Image (spheres, coloured by chain):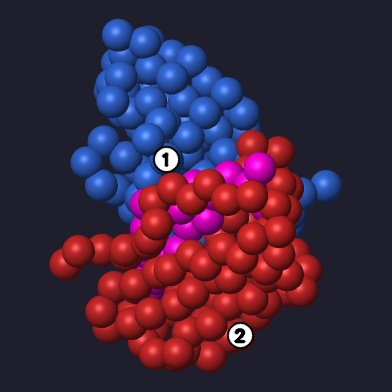
Amino acid sequence: KNEVEQSPQNLTAQEGEFITINCSYSVGISALHWLQQHPGGGIVSLFMLSSGKKKHGRLIATINIQEKHSSLHITASHPRDSAVYICAVRSGDDKIIFGKGTRLHILP
Amino acid sequence: DAGVIQSPRHEVTEMGQEVTLRCKPISGHNSLFWYRQTMMRGLELLIYFNNNVPIDDSGMPEDRFSAKMPNASFSTLKIQPSEPRDSAVYFCASSLYSPLHFGNGTRLTVT
């Protein structure tokens, strides 16, 4: 079993829909990252969380340390949000472990 | 800031050749990470440095891979000899107690 599991693996939605991507992990962590990788391949760090919730524009990330779970939400989704979203955790022994990613496709 | 700079962007080489990938982290960042991304395995951490010192190289596939960080502004990842299964996109990232900042990656093809 992977130490970082994301769901869903693939998600197609209509423009304007509210999107939720989930990440569960099984190790102790010091931080959790949400990354975005566009079709061109570049990777952008969206959030780094160690507790609670962060918001940036239409993106919201939450983490529940007790449940070892994080969610990334996109409000009013847009075709330009189409990308692969990757959850990564920094474990207690300072390793970084990646989920397999969620491929999001927003239809106009 | 120019961000994390990787070179080359693309590299095509024949099996058995030496390959050197380069990374310039963001100035002032004290951590540098090398990752590899393939369709089959996704993103994998190969090695990371803190203050130019290798902290964890447990992700380095085998002895054919080596990484150095001679100073705070430069790192290399070397593969010698290269094999077709090394074909992947190699990313470098840097950070300073902050979210990771990724370079654009080097797409390596070993034929």
User: What span is colored magenta in the figure?
Assistant: B86-111
Q: Nearer the viewer, residue B68 or A15?
A: B68
Tell me if B38 is positioned left or right of A38 in this view.
Answer: right
Q: Chain of mark 1?
A: A
Tell me if B62 is positioned left or right of B1 in this view.
Answer: right
Q: Which image quarter is the N terminus of chain B in?
A: bottom left
What residue is pinned by disc 1?
A41
Q: Dividing the picture into quarters, in which one does residue A8 lie?
A: top right
Callout 2 and callout 1 share a chain: no
Query: Which of the numbered marks, if any, corresponds to residue B55?
Result: 2
Q: Which chain is red?
A: B
Is B94 one of the magenta-colored residues?
yes
Residue, x 30% and y 19% (percent of image)?
A79
**Apparent colour of chain A:** blue
Q: Chain of mark 2?
A: B
> Mark 1: which amino acid?
Gly
Q: Residues within 10 Å of mark 2 (few under 14, many from 20)?
A: some
Residue A35 position within the rendered picture, expressed as x and y whole percent measured from the top left: 44, 48
Residue B40 position within the rendered picture, expressed as x and y whole percent measured from the top left: 71, 38
Residue B45 position within the rendered picture, expressed as x and y whole percent measured from the top left: 61, 63
Q: Is residue B88 above or below residue A108?
A: below
Q: Nearer the viewer, residue B101 or B63?
A: B63
Residue, x 28% and y 21% (percent of image)?
A78
Q: Residues within 10 Å of mark 1 (few under 14, many from 20)?
A: some
Is A55 one of the magenta-colored residues?
no
Q: Is residue A89 above or below residue B52?
A: above
Q: Dividing the picture into quarters, in which one does residue B24 lie?
A: bottom left
> Mark 2: which amino acid?
Ile
Structural distance between the alpha carbons of marks 2 and 1: 27 Å
Q: Dividing the picture into quarters, in which one does residue A94 lie?
A: bottom right
Helix, strand or loop at disc 2? strand
Residue located farthest toward the left when viewing the structure as drawn: B1
